[in-house]
Amino acid sequence: MERLPLAGLRVADFSWMGAGSYATKMLADFGAEVIKIESMANLDNLRMSRPFKDKIPGVNRSGYFADRNTSKRSMTINMKHEKGKLIARQLIAQSDIVCNNFTPGVMERFGLGYEEVAAFKANIVYISMSMQGNSGPHRDYLGYGMTMGALTGLQHLTGAPDREPAGTGTNYPDHIPNPCHAVVAIMASLIHRDSTGEGQYIDLAQTEPTLALLGPVILDYTVNGRVQQRRANRHDYMSPHGIYPCHGDDRWIAIAVETDAQWRALASVLGMPLWMTEATWSSAEQRLAKQSELDDRLATETCGWDNDELMLALQVHGVAAGSVRDVADILEKDAQLAHRGHWLRLDHPEMGRTIYNAQPMRMSDLAVTPTRPAPMLGADTEDICVSLLGMNPKEVAALQEEGALR
Amino acid sequence: MESGKGGALQGVRVLEVAGQMTGYCGKLLAELGAEVVLVEAPEENFARRQPPFIDGRRDADASLSFAYYNTSKKSITLDLDQPEGCQMLRDLVADYHILIEGEPPGALASKGLDYKILQALTPSLVMTSLTAFGQTGPYANFAFSDLTLLALGGMLYLAGYPDTPPMGAYGNQAINAAGMYGAVGTLIALRAVRNGQPGRHVDVSAQECVALGMENAVQMFELEGVIRKRFAGTQRQAGTSVFASSDGYVLLMAAGLASNQFWLNTVKWLISEGVPRAEELGGEKWLNVEYLQTEDAKREFLDIFGPFAQARTSEYLYEKGQQFRVPICPVCSPRDVVSNAQLRSRNYFVDVPSAPAGRDLKMPGPPYRLQATPWRIQGAAPSLGEHNIEIYSRAGVAASRLAALASAGVL
């Protein structure tokens, strides 16, 4: 088997729900041994979140959980049990990385705050991904990806100017900004550790990466005093730039025109409607000045088209266009993601062959990852206790009996 | 550049062929301590033309977008449309660990700058290519904008109001996503090199990155046959929505998570505030998610919570709701964000003195705090070619060759 780039690293993974699990999934998919520490006593809510295989709820049946926990091992430890805490310590002592996305104070209650861990495992790379960070007046506040979108300005800026702020409709910070920033910080810390032997603590406040993606709009306020508002799908200098209706129910296409030549190509593909040939629309400046009218008129030209056919026709002429893919389209009609091999079907012991996302980057000599599904709850508990922590099966059974390993 | 404690990536040298896709990836590495050298075309750089601009200026240092995405970097000019420029890049690469680029697929290969050639010269090189759709495939050469990538990546369909076209996420999130995943892949490959593995080419597709932002939509379709749609402006289920306050909006997530705890907390809070009919929300039926999804439930919740929220400030609702352990927060504008007490307390925003801009620029700071090797801005975004002499002389390029290249317009 090929050697994955992160082979040989071990992660004691206390993360749950969204961002933490998605971060450690990347490490696992690229070869780290990620041990997800879970408990029947305090289940990762995602294990009980829809959708379920055959619509039957069960801790090993959630597609949402499965996609976020590929390639990991699962060990159940009851962190409220004294012996459970001790076992977690032993596991950390043999790990390179500790990851959690609890509210500040939870790991400390387990006796596993950074200071305590560093005392017995000095070179640990330890990341805490709390909602608002480990300091400040709001450090204990509750939130989820959607509230982070709201706190950072992303929600305010996304949507129609005359409507309530729309946001992404998802817990976006959980899916891309926070897990990616977490892995960047972890990898940089490992590279530092490799050359100096020094581990460290990483405090990632889950609002701060998303805000770091909004630099220009923040600068527009701090430098120019301008508070930008949401503006539907409009753009500073491209016109037309928007989402236009196509043939069928709730079918749309995104079109973005940057140059006047592209505008003429758009007109040509749409069959040279008379109005599009008028001089009044010929420059971007003119089009920007009358965008509402332009959008309305363009909609009447696109609405008879199949969105994929229009996209392909426009692309032949170098006009940026993309069908608005719903989930059925993206799975069944997107030739590019199919070419990339993005949709994976992995064989899960209880769910059977179900769908997973691939990682969105390819490395020259490596196959697409992941190749292993999410773990069954506690599937690796005994093996980890025996082969890693040196217990014998009787001891493991006794600890299970006592409720320390459940 | 200031001295001081080095970052985690101190000693790592990066070339970034400046383009539409590369800015954030390079910035992430630079602020962890890597030396990132922007390779800019002498006359044309997309990134320097991006709005907003300082005080309406339009010179090469006026873009606030450029000023943000290129902090901590150095700039050299090099014309990769000329063979001498390409040769220079091949010469430079030998001294660098990482090359980041975002040119259209095949563009560098046509100039003899593809990974195979560069790796033959520098076997440990990590080359990261950030493109809209990846290096190969039927859409690889499609024209794109951030909006078309959000559309094709599936995030767009989930965003917006049921009665309008979908709404694109603000702020080039597809391009940012490619930058973030690019940094992840780059560092994974770099560490592997440090541990004796060969250099690698990291091929990132922005469309594919966006597909990771579809939440559970893919599994909902596969396992339950449901096509997830957009719901802005409506309650996703009773108690989970944006609600108007007296001075803006708040976002409340009282229900819909696996546990009912936040619903119970919300009811307790509203009763303590003396909200009329709040106790009606305490009945058994409200603990059933199917009921929460009914129009009756949404209407009743809005009747009770709506008037209460509309009479109070977002700040009040935030503080009081959080005291009762309710996931609620204000919907912040950029102005609100800059004055946010939590972010101020964490000294999140940084003032970057910028000679090219002619002023200090207050901008978002550390996206993470690395205790031993702090995140740090190493300097303002450079002016065009600011570091030509430093970088080319360090690479051992003779003054006579530099002068010849300059007069031929290669620099």
Image (cartoon, coloured by chain):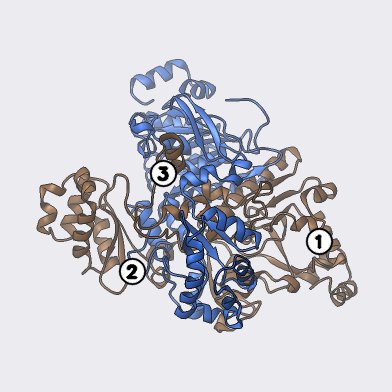
Chain colours: A brown, B blue
Which three-letter amino acid code belongs to the residue tagged 1?
Ala
Q: Which mark is residue A88?
A: 1
Find residue A380 and report its horizontal and vertical position in percent: 75, 70
Q: Which mark is residue A246?
A: none
Q: Mark 3 = which residue?
A: A227
Judge the density around disc 2: few (<14), some (14-19), many (≥20) Cα neighbours within 10 Å: few
Query: Horizontal and vertical percent for residue B89?
Result: 45, 32
Instruction: Estimate the spatial distance between the alpha carbons at disc 1 and disc 2, rounded to whole Å.
Output: 51 Å
Chain bearing mark 3? A
Residue type marked 2: Asp
Q: Are marks 1 and 2 on the same chain?
A: no
Separation of marks 3 and 2 at Cα, in angstroms:
27 Å
Q: Residues within 10 Å of mark 1 (few under 14, many from 20)?
A: many
Q: Mark yes or no: residue A256 visible.
A: yes
Q: Chain of mark 1?
A: A
Above or below residue B11? Residue B408 is: above
Of the residues tagged 1 and 2, which is closer to the observer?
2
Of residues A207 and B383, which is closer to you in this image? A207
Mark 1 or mark 3: which is in front? 3
| Image depth: mark 3 or mark 2 in front | 3
Is residue B212 visible from the viewing direction of this image? no
Q: Which residue is mark 2?
A: B163
